[in-house]
Image (cartoon, rainbow, N blue to C red):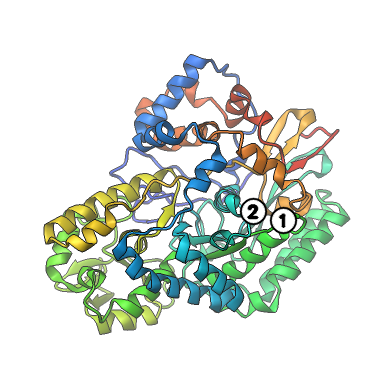
Amino acid sequence: MSDTSTISNDPLHDEGGDELFTEKDTTIRVNQSPLAFDDGTLPSDQTLTPELFTRYKEKVFKARPNFAIINQTSGDLPLYDYLRRQVRENRESTMKKRKAEIIDCIGEETRRLLGTSIAESVMRQLKGNNTVSTIQHSAPLSHPYVLSSTLQNALPSFGNDHPNLRNAIVLSCANVSFNNYKFPRGHIFHSFGNNTIKSHLLTLFGHTADARPVINHPPYHHDAITEIKNRIHTIQREGDLTKEETEKLISFFEEVYESPHALSANDYHDQLTITNYWIFKKMFEKYPKAVPNLVFISQEKVTLQLLLKYHLYTDTLLHKLLFNQEMHQRIITHFEGLNGAFSTEKKYGTFLFWALPKNSKYRIQLWLKNGSLVSNDGSYSVALQPEALEQAIRRNELFPNTLLTFITLSFYYGQYLGGGPAQTLNLTRMKEAFIALLEEIQDHESLNAVKDVITTNLIISRPTLAYIDIPKDDRRIPATGLDLILYSDKGKSWDRTIDATKQTTLSQFFNRALESFYAEFVPPSEKEPNLTKITERDIEKFTGLNQKIPPLITLENKSYS
């Protein structure tokens, strides 16, 4: 199993969502393949003991103290109950006054892409439920990390007709590069022909798009789907797919990706909103109860629409953040060096906006200089004035960094953002810095509004609910979105998984992800050789989690190399 796609570990690349890493962190980001999720599915030669496992967790908790806090306060809750408790309304008086604006913008973006009926449902939900997910990167519902986060986000809504739970609302990070390991370029699936497990990539875009962010990228066209279908037929000829499986895949891409609705979209992210909506429906088309709508839209686009409509020409707090020179210096004072923000000293991140001029292959850092945002080489600049900013936004030349996005969505509009291990730490640190800024300018109304905004809603951004079991090999593989389309029962047995999440605690699910967290967050100087050997399969068998969460796909009576 091999793949040459990698992500950059250059700290200039603010990948957003759950993957915000900078030099200030102890984290060392290594390049990852889109297929790395399968690496831990075999046991190691390391025997786990209670003492060893305790030390393993302590290493992770030391590197990420927010994990320890969440584990201590909520670890004993069943995962279902934990996610259900995140469903709540922000009733703070200032946030309630502002709410109509964000409901309007999210509703309009939904209406534009998914129609009036779903938009009205989303707007009704946001009146009484201010919890949305921001952990997902803008990518097809394919990679197990994207799939897992989405399933968790949607979990309390299955079988529920309450108007506050009819939609799984995802404000995804479109700042992610095409070469990110969550594979925005296309789909991933497993094949089991020739007595061998193989993983395959089906790409909508070539490697020329790799360094570019997803936001505002041109849409794929009919020829990209033709190439994918040709690739599927090649995989069949090589003996890795049956005729029936090939026909299923071809039919899927024709129905979802070649639909007039998807092909008429303005850009690739608009296509993702449309295609992910239908993929989710197809995954659960045989679930006998209510299935939520997956509303998968760009957090950056929503933020830009809010700024354009309500803040460029009106004297709001966000207006001051954008245009007041004294406020600019306070932003530098309070947010310098924070993940998702910027460092003027070390030159990572960007000041409030990234630039992406027409025909540019790369996003461009911008820095505050004499009342303007200016690139490092001076080739691009935009005055921090309402008219200039509006024109640049409407030309699709600017999009917000994670700091400005989260200030807008969370701290100004009071949405409760569900995030992964990095986001729950970063968002909390941003909130502390924002509170300090508000105290400094004595904005007591905004200060009271932001104090109780929840920043620690955790979604485990690693495989949790969708597995392929191979009993003969005692192996358990994370399923991809296409795997569920190809091999699952389309949701008929999904209630078994839901029931399991009501009996299995957040801490138990978190334990399975420890291998990934240990690799990513524990500094190299503190890693131990025997702990580094531990795989996800070791943890599953040690904790018994493989007996608690039923597979969505089971391959019986066959052994695979």
Compared to 502, does 488 lie above or below? below
Q: Position of residue 110 (x, y in %)?
A: 53, 73
Residue 12, image x, y percentages: 34, 55
Per the rendering, the mark at residue 73 is none
Residue 284 visible within the image = yes
At 74% across and 40% down in the image, what residue appears? 197
Q: Quadrant of the N terminus?
A: top right
Name the residue that disc number 1 marks: 289
Q: Nearer the viewer, residue 326 or 348?
A: 326
Res 336 seen here:
no
Q: Residues within 10 Å of mark 2 (few under 14, many from 20)?
A: many
Compared across the picture, whether 348 is left or right of 29 comes to left
Q: Element type at marker 1?
A: loop
Instruction: Name the residue nearer the viewer: 367 or 233.
Output: 367
Q: Is residue 239 left or right of 539 when viewed as pictured?
A: right
Distance Cα–Cα, label 1 vs label 2: 7 Å
